[in-house]
């Protein structure tokens, strides 16, 4: 696909200057980054119209999903150099009319709830769920590619969150999964602050 080719060429051009991806993954760019991101499209409901990608970095998976769909996509990336790359990548891929880049931390971005929230290699679930919850609404789903320690992350997150999820095996890495969350709610503490348990 020409749009993905243009995106990949731009990434390789910018890579020496701002280290968008790990250098050791460059030989496997298409499998490690593009396929890894593209496989999420199968988990997106056909009626989904908006996507918020947290910690977008080099645009995986958010920009890939923008190219493969008709969704309006918000890429949130606090690094201004990476944000500049994302704007240029959206332009060369021909999706800048549907992609907005927010050069800010997710905690400071104000957006209405999205149909889909995505994040890849940003944080553990314990840190990721509070960020995603800010953009959660009725019918929202979250798509989080995770590595082989995903069960440990789920166990840790379950102390503070009610989570409904599926774990779908990744097509790009046998040890990874795609977590698809359909519900997430913070657990209320057993007692108010300052009260005895």
Image (spheres, rainbow, N blue to C red):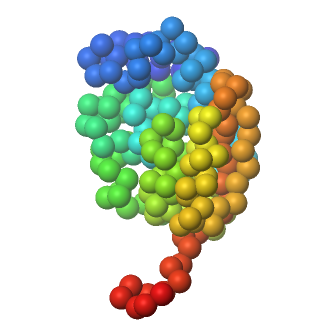
Residue in front for this viewpoint, 126 or 110: 126
Q: Is residue 137 visible?
A: no
Q: Is residue 112 above or below residue 172?
A: below
Location of residue 1 (image quadrant): top right
Q: With 182 as the anchor, is 191 left or right in this view?
A: left
Q: Is residue 152 visible?
A: yes
Residue 98 at x, y percent in the picture: 49, 42
Residue 196 at x, y percent in the picture: 43, 90
Residue 111 at x, y percent in the picture: 43, 60
Residue in front for this viewpoint, 118 or 83: 118
Q: Residue at x 54, y 45 (%)?
A: 118
Residue 78 at x, y percent in the picture: 30, 43
Residue found at the very far front of the displayed protein: 197
Q: With 149 as the anchor, is 174 left or right in this view?
A: right
Q: How many marks?
A: 0
Residue found at the very far top of the displayed protein: 27
Q: Is residue 86 above or below residue 76?
A: above
Q: Residue at x 32, y 36 (%)?
A: 83
Q: With 171 as the anchor, is 101 left or right in this view?
A: left
Q: Is residue 26 above or below residue 63?
A: above
Location of residue 61 (image quadrant): top right
Q: Residue at x 70, y 25 (%)?
A: 174
Residue found at the very far bottom of the displayed protein: 195
Q: Residue at x 66, y 40 (%)?
A: 178
Q: Is residue 197 above or below residue 93?
A: below
Residue in front for this viewpoint, 99 or 137: 137
């Amino acid at each position: 696909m020409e749009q993905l080719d243009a995106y990949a060429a731009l990434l390789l051009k910018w890579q020496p200057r701002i280290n968008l991806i790990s250098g050791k993954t460059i030989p496997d760019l298409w499998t490690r980054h593009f396929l890894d991101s593209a496989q999420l499209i199968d988990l997106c409901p056909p009626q989904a119209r908006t996507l918020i990608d947290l910690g977008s970095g080099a645009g995986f998976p958010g920009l890939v999903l923008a190219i493969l769909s008709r969704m309006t996509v918000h890429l949130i990336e606090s690094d201004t150099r990476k944000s500049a790359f994302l704007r240029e990548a959206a332009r060369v891929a021909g999706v800048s009319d549907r992609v907005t880049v927010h050069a800010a931390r997710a905690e400071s971005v104000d957006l209405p709830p999205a149909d889909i929230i995505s994040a890849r290699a940003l944080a553990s679930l314990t840190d990721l769920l509070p960020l995603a919850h800010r953009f959660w609404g009725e019918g929202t789903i979250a798509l989080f590619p995770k590595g082989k320690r995903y069960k440990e992350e789920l166990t840790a997150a379950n102390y503070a969150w009610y989570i409904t999820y599926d774990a779908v095996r990744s097509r790009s890495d046998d040890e990874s999964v795609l977590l698809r969350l359909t519900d997430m709610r913070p657990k209320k503490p057993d007692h108010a602050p300052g009260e005895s348990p």
